[in-house]
Image (spheres, helix red, strand yellow):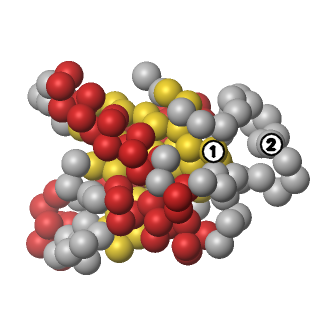
Amino acid sequence: MATLERGIDRPGPGAPASGPGARCALIALDRSDLPEAVVPSFLAQTHGSVDDLVLLEILPDWSRGEFEAVMRARLLRVASAPASSDVHVAVDVRRGEPVALIVDAARRHGADLIAMVEHPRGLADRLLLGPSVLESVARESGLPVLLLRGAGA
């Protein structure tokens, strides 16, 4: 369930965002990503061009409610950090298949851009496992995808 912690309610998909040139970005995270590092880096890269930001944490189906609560609290701390003060931030924590959840969340929140942390894969993985989550999201969403560097990338 999405929770808007600060800012104004977002209009529905397809409706104009608040103000001229307003943009909404969705940052898709998984439990291996560090939102405390990813969000400030993203905001620095976008140079104030984003008015609304959705932090989407994807958890595996087997995760428990307590873990979901911990992740939501962690994202809320990141959302209230000084680096996020000029942006309306929503926090969304979901369990399930990442590609479908990311594409659905981008549509529900009216995102203009999806940002994801790069998890490098070798040629053998690409041949054996098929397209990455990032590649599938880019193809299925039809939105631009900004690649963010992870701690190990």
Q: Residues within 10 Å of mark 1 (few under 14, many from 20)?
A: many
Work out whether residue 14 can be spotted. Answer: yes
Q: Please give left or right for residue 13 compared with residue 21 in the image.
A: left
| On-image quarter of the C terminus | bottom left
List the residue tagged with mark 2. 18
Foreground of the two, 153 or 120:
153
- Image coordinates of residue 53 in percent, x first then y, are 57, 48
- Name the spot of residue 81 as percent of width and height, x first: 47, 54
Is residue 112 in view?
A: no
Which quadrant, please, contains the N terminus? top left
Q: Is residue 24 above or below residue 104?
A: below
Residue shown at the point (69%, 29%) measured from the top left: 9
Q: Are marks 2 and 1 in contact (CB under 8 Å)?
A: yes
| Residue 127 picture location, percent across and down | 17, 67
Number of residues whose C-alpha sits closer than 10 Å to that of mark 2, classed few (under 14), some (14–19) or many (20 or more): some
The three-letter amino acid code for the residue at tag 1 is: His
Q: Nearer the viewer, mark 2 or mark 1?
A: 1
Question: Is residue 58 positioned above or below 146 on the image?
Answer: above
Q: In the structure shown, which secondary structural element does the residue marked by tag 2 occupy?
A: loop
Q: Which mark is residue 88?
A: 1
| Residue that appears at 22% across and 48% down | 31
- Residue type pointed to by label 2: Ser
Instruction: Using the rendered view, name the quadrant where residue 72 is placed.
Output: top left
Say which of 139 and 58 sits in front. Answer: 58
- Residue at 35% x, 59% y is 36
